Amino acid sequence: MNRRRRMTGVVASNKMTRTVVVEIRRTFRHPLYRKVVHRTKRVKAHDELGCQIGDQVQIVESRPLSREKRWVVEKILKREVRSAEGALAAEEWLARAPSDVAPSVTEETP
């Protein structure tokens, strides 16, 4: 095992070619006020494994690969499971939501 830093996070975006955006969540107690603080850091990582949005991944520090990329996806810890039924239900909800939930923009209000 080498001394490179390793972190785990969740893939937030995979719209770039061979690059993913990984969100790293950190929870700690503030040293003075003792309140629980949540911090999120977003880093770009090189992806040769084909990660999808929602996958939990382990990233490892590397040499600079581009202006903003200094991490590489080492392994996928947990795949995000998306069912076809859930996606279909979401599409149906979005298709009918504007007319059922919100008033139409074309209707004039007094």
Image (cartoon, rainbow, N blue to C red):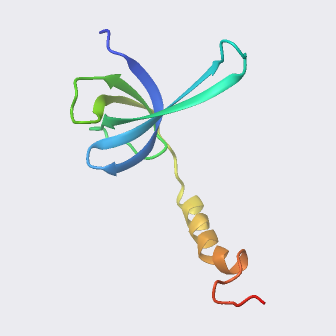
Q: Would you say 52 lies left or right of 62 here?
A: right
* Residue at 21% from the left image edge and 32% from the top image edge: 65
Instruction: Say if 15 sits above or below 106 in the image.
Output: above
Q: Nearer the viewer, residue 53 or 78?
A: 53
Q: Position of residue 39 (x, y in %)?
A: 57, 29
Instruction: Say if 29 sits above or below 84 in the image.
Output: above
Q: Position of residue 30 (x, y in %)?
A: 66, 17
| Quadrant placement of the N terminus | top left
* Residue at 32% from the left image edge and 14% from the top image edge: 4
Q: Position of residue 10 (x, y in %)?
A: 48, 36
Q: Nearer the viewer, residue 57 or 62?
A: 62
* Residue at 63% from the left image edge and 89% from the top image edge: 106
Instruction: Say if 99 sits above or below 33 in the image.
Output: below
Q: Position of residue 69 (x, y in %)?
A: 28, 34
The quarter holding residue 105 reads bottom right
Instruction: Say if 10 sits above or below 7 in the image.
Output: below
The quarter holding residue 94 reads bottom right
| Quadrant placement of the C terminus | bottom right
* Residue at 60% from the left image edge and 64% from the top image edge: 90
Q: Nearer the viewer, residue 58 or 100?
A: 100
Task: Count every numbered label the image shows and give the total.
Answer: 0
